[in-house]
Structures are given as structure tokens and as C-alpha cells.
Amino acid sequence: MLKVAPSILACDFTKLLEEVKTVENATFLHIDVMDGHFVPNISLGPCVYNNLKGKVNMIFDVHLMISHPEKYYQEFIKSGADYLTLHLEALQDNNTNIIELINAIHQLGCKVGLAIKPNTDVSLLNDYLPYIDLALVMSVEPGFGGQKFMANVLSKVTYLKEQKLDNYYKYLIEIDGGINDMTAKLAKNAGCDVVVAGTYIFNSSNRQLKIKELENL
Ligand code: DX5
Ligand code: ZN
């Protein structure tokens, strides 16, 4: 079964808890953190979702689109991240020791994801695949919801699936951006385990049904 991660970027933040409750039948809650530097948009910080912790029964999937995840990761874990996903591009720009950072996050009891933008070569993840819990393939340029799905990234999903099967890796494969029923089906067929969906779910008048439909594709 495909797992669904509704993205709160598309919800009405004036009634955040109420909004999240409407999608609580999904497995994950996708939380997009943007710093206006790594991406050209600013969204939210850890204090926003900290208040949701314990009030909804979902796995908190925190997607950090920030230039210095190595400086801030502890705050995001303290605030309730279950999975913390960092962008490979940001870590490489900072010359961060990625394996050490993965270990540090694991020691704090949090799962680790690595994300790649649409133009980043998937093989750059190779050294880290044995250690991560989630690989996030961006199917839009990160920064904004409501963009069009880039189907050319599906080959990265296939590659990650092959690597996983060949090497008995454990990571989930997640895709993020432009997901609807049609693109989710393509992602599932390519090997995705989790689809992130913002606009598609939150713009629907029956969000729970949309989630179920995606799960059962
Ligand atoms: C984009 C974010 C996505 C976004 C997806 O940078 O990472 O999670 O919320 O939104 P939709 O589903 O509308 O493309
Ligand atoms: Zn995201």
C-alpha cells in the first residue's frame, strides 16, 4: 500500500490543528521548512509543529529546505520530528560530514532522510544509502506548492528501488511535488513507498477520501 504524507504547506495556518485533523487518516504529516535562502520562500520553524505533537496520531516527516541543516537539526528533533530530511545539496555546499551527521541524528532517536532536487544526480546519494531511513526525490523545484510534476525524475525512483532491492537497504522512497492521482500512480509504479501531496489533498472537499484513493492506487 502506498503511504501518503499530506503537506501542511497547503493548509490554512490560522487553524492548523483543525486542518491537520482532517488528514489524520494518513500515515505521515509532511512539514516543509524553508529559510528563504536554500529556497526562495520562507515557511515555518520548529515552534509551529511542536504544538501539534501529541495531538495527532501521525508520523512527523520534516523536510528541511534550509542552507544550514547541520546547525539546526537538534531543534527540529526536540520539536517532534520523527523523520528529519536534509537536502544533499546544502550539506555538500557546507562540506558537512554527512555520515557523522546521520549518526548524530540517529543518536537523538530520529530517523534520517536525504533529499535531492530535480537536477541533482541520484548517484550522489550512493555513499549514504546504507545508512538512511528515507530517500526523498523532489519532483518540482523546492520552494512552492502547486507546481507541475516533473516526470523525468521517475528514473531516480527506479534507480533507488533497484539499489534497495539489490543491497537489502531499508530506506523508504518518497516523492514530493505535483502529486495527484495520476502522478502518484506513476510514482508507485516506479517504486515509491510514500507520496507527499499538498494542493491535491488540501484543495479537496473530501480529504480523507483522497488519501484513501492514493493509498489504494
Ligand atoms: C515544495 C514542498 C512540497 C509541497 C508540495 O517545495 O517540498 O512538499 O508542499 O506541494 P504540492 O503537492 O502542492 O506540489
Ligand atoms: Zn516537502
Image: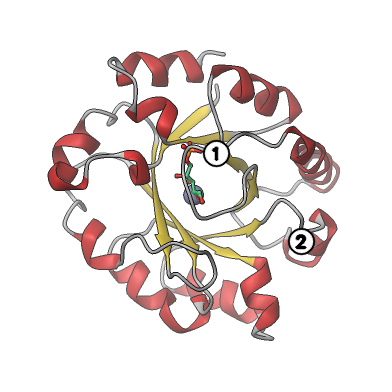
Q: How far across and down, in percent of the image, does residue 154 sit?
A: 76, 35
Q: Quadrant of the C terminus?
A: top right
Number of other residues with Cα within 10 Å of mark 1, as a class: few under 14, some 14 to 19, many 20 or more: some
- Which label sits on residue 46? none
Relative side of 193 to 74, left or right: right
Nearer to the camera, 7 or 165: 7
Q: Is residue 180 left or right of residue 30?
A: right
Residue 95, image x, y percentages: 69, 86
Residue at mark 1? 147
Dot 2: element: helix
Three-letter code, disc 2? Leu
Rendering coords of residue 113 (x, y %): 57, 58
- Image quarter where the N terminus lies is top right
Give the colouring mode of the picture. secondary structure
Check disc 1 and give the amino acid type. Gln
Kindly identify the residue that appears in the image at 43 percent across and 70 percent down.
Answer: 35
Does label 1 or label 2 sit earlier along the sequence? 2
Judging by the rendered image, the residue that carries numbered circle 2 is 125
Percent position of residue 181, x then y: 54, 18
Q: Nearer the viewer, residue 129 or 21?
A: 21
Q: Quadrant location of residue 20?
A: top left
Residue drawn at (35%, 60%), measured in percent from left and top?
43
How many residues crowd mark 2 within 10 Å: few (<14), some (14–19), many (20+)? some
In the image: residue 168, left or right of residue 211: right
CA gap, disc 1 to disc 2?
25 Å
Judge by depth and name the residue closer to the eye, 151 or 20.
Answer: 151
Local secondary structure at mark 1: loop
Within 8 Å: ligand 1 and the Cβ of disc 1? yes
Residue occupying image coordinates x 79% and y 43%: 156
